[in-house]
Image (tube, grey):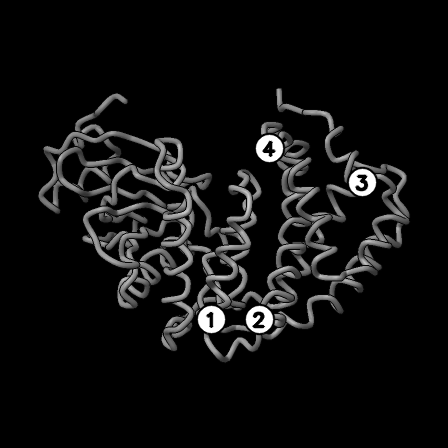
Amino acid sequence: MITVPASTLAPPAASFLAAEGHGDAQLTPFTADASPRRYHRLEGRGLILMEDPSDPVGYAAFLLLSAHLNSLGLSAPRIMARDKANGLALIEDLGDATYTHCLKAGEDERTLYHLAVDTLLHLHHDPSGSDVGQPRYDIEVMLKELAIFAEWFAPAIRPELDANFARDWRALWRAALAPVADRFDTLIMRDFHVDNLMLLDDRKGIARCGLLDFQDAALGPCEYDLMSLLQDARRDLAPGLEDEMLARYLENAPKHLGNAADIRHRYYILAAQRHARILGVFVRLNQRDGKPNYLKWMPRVAQQLRTALDDAQLTDISALLGAHLPEWQSRAATISPQTNS
């Protein structure tokens, strides 16, 4: 990575750093997520400059949720300075030890997932976890996400798709989502997986699990983040690890979530919903955005959807897919890459 002097940045960022006493800093640019945000590490200062001028809502949510998560004893990057007018912030640098990096380096997978599940349990047991002004992950949001499947994945599999498919798909899912439709039990990160988790060896307990990319968090069902952790669209867990971690959660789950069967049922419904959305998103990324790289995960996500539909006993939805999209699972692997010229 090439470092650049802080003074070479555009005037709002350069002026902000100078005003905070970092005008002489050396910066290393990097990409931390798929958003338009830009990040620069202030070398040797334990700080990162975040530039987010194009998304004032996401910027405000990041600042709000950073404070909220830290107030709960969790480890989100703290905000050290801010310039709201220009979408700038100096945030705590948590390092480079994402779970993805740690797993590649040989860290024990079970230990990492154990810590992540305990972090969720800590959040879910705290009654103030949902005491923050974020949108609700309600049934209309879930159905809007599922429409991506009908709009992108389904016609990619069968161009002559029956016009009634989208209507029936939506109606069946509205009924299927009833057990999770009104559950706003906690703050859900929406993308709680290995790319957005960090191992912070200088901290203790659940504070060792660093949290990233939480600005899209919403109020929703506790099972959502657990499911996105354990049914990752892009990596397989060791055999038996999902069951072990799910059992750990069930053993220690908040009483208000009901019995183990109820929690499992919601977990599998949410898994089916998420996997269906992701299939649509991956096709959209390929066809609309010229990003075919995501297609390599289509077969595994299709298998995840098939398994989740069976586990949640969503037989009507499975029957609809069988009637309108024969062999949809095997054909998920045949979608042709497209790139923007």
| Residue corresponding to mark 4 | 294
Tally the marks: 4
- Mark 2 vs 4, N-terminal side: 2
**Residue visible at 55% across and 38% down in the picture:** 234
Pick the front one: 262 or 176: 262
Find the distance from the CA under tag 3 to the CA under tag 1: 36 Å
| Residue corresponding to mark 2 | 260
Q: x and y percent of residue 120 in the render?
A: 41, 62
Could you tell me if the residues under marks 1 and 2 are in contact, i.e. CB atoms within 8 Å?
Answer: yes
Q: Look at label 1 and name its amino acid.
A: Ala
Q: x and y percent of residue 102 in the render?
A: 35, 37
Is 33 on the left-hand or right-hand side of 13?
A: right
| Residue corresponding to mark 1 | 253
| Residue corresponding to mark 3 | 328
- Mark 3 vs 4, N-terminal side: 4
Q: Look at label 2 and name its amino acid.
A: Ala
Pick the front one: 297 or 11: 297
Regarding mark 4 in the picture, which secondary structure is present there? helix
In the figure, residue 107 lies in which quadrant?
A: top left
Pick the front one: 200 or 20: 200
- Mark 3 vs 1, N-terminal side: 1
